[in-house]
Amino acid sequence: MIKVLQYSFYDLIRSRWSYVYLLFYLVLGFALLFLNSSVSKSIITLMNIIIVLTPMIGTIFGVMYYYSSREFTELLLAQPMKRTTIFLGQYLGVSLSLTLSLVLGLGIPFTFYGLWQSAEMANFGLLLLSGSFLTFIFVALAYNIGLSNDNKIKGFGYAILVWLFMAVIYDGLFLISLIVFEDYPLDKFTLLATMFNPIDLSRILILLKLDISALLGYTGAVFQKFFGTNRGMISSLLVLSIWTLVPVYLITRKASKKDF
């Protein structure tokens, strides 16, 4: 698996799109620090961008790499290698390359700005951790979609639909349900509904750390009241880990049963 991971990682690192992704975050980091002149405000702004953009990039890159490397994958399958080794290696290669672009793209400008002497270093680390989680989660979802659909057009369509549902539609349905059933106690429902969306979980994780959960309105208030700051963070990280491991497990199952 290590050799497949290395090949996928270096293949994507050499891709121009990886440099574009890195350059985007690099420019964004310098621009936000220049305009805000505050690390804390820049982190809040980056949160709103990362929790939407990172899943989209992970989904698109994941499904693109799966279909573009299909012939190479079939060649590897003809070798005495386990299927799970091949697909997990490719998945980790894609996820790690995107995560590296994210970390370097934001880490360089914040380091130049003096992050290591700032009190916001832990918050910035949490921001990168949330972005990394979202990358691994949505690349895994993209690979599951690719393994389930041989048709590229359907695969791309389903991948975009999954991202759109998680990033936009889910929150809309959630807000509508809160309005419709406002006369009923919705504390437990709010907590459960939030856990079923990794994007919302990442947002809550950062806001709890920044102690500005009021920005989430009712959802953030209930989450902080029920769990408390420390327990809320631990619970969020645990659920994000589950969101990562379950799709990876499904990749291994689908890869072992898929007929190429």
Image (tube, rainbow, N blue to C red):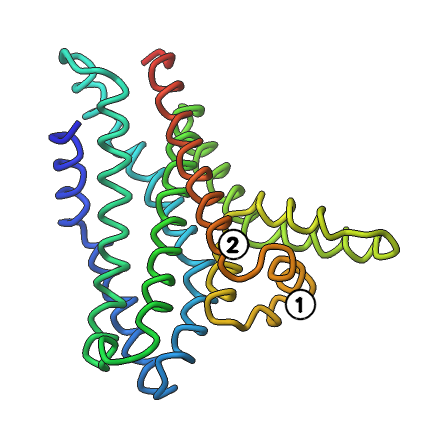
Q: Residue at x 23, y 82 (%)?
A: 113
Three-letter code for the amino acid on which mark 1 is drawn: Gly
The image shows residue 75 at horizontal and vertical percentages of: 17, 19
- Cα gap from disc 2 to disc 1, whole angstroms: 19 Å
Label 2 packing within 10 angstroms: few (<14), some (14-19), many (20+): few
Three-letter code for the amino acid on which mark 2 is drawn: Arg
**Residue 126 location, quadrant:** bottom left
Residue beneath disc 2: 231
Residue beneath disc 1: 217
Q: Which residue of the protein is positioned furthest toward the right in this rendering?
A: 183
Please say if 4 is above or below 9: above
Q: Quadrant of the C terminus?
A: top left
Q: Quadrant of the N terminus?
A: top left
Name the foreground residue: 202 vs 163.
202
In front: label 2 or label 1: 2
Q: Residue at x 55, y 48 (%)?
A: 166
The image shows residue 230 at horizontal and vertical percentages of: 49, 59
Please say if 85 is above or below 10: above
The answer to which of marks 2 and 1 sits earlier in the sequence is 1
The image shows residue 175 at horizontal and vertical percentages of: 72, 56
Q: Residue at x 22, y 75 (%)?
A: 116
Left or right: residue 194 versus residue 208 is right
Name the foreground residue: 238 vs 31.
238
The image shows residue 231 at horizontal and vertical percentages of: 52, 54
As drawn, the label of residue 61 is: none
SS for dot 2: helix
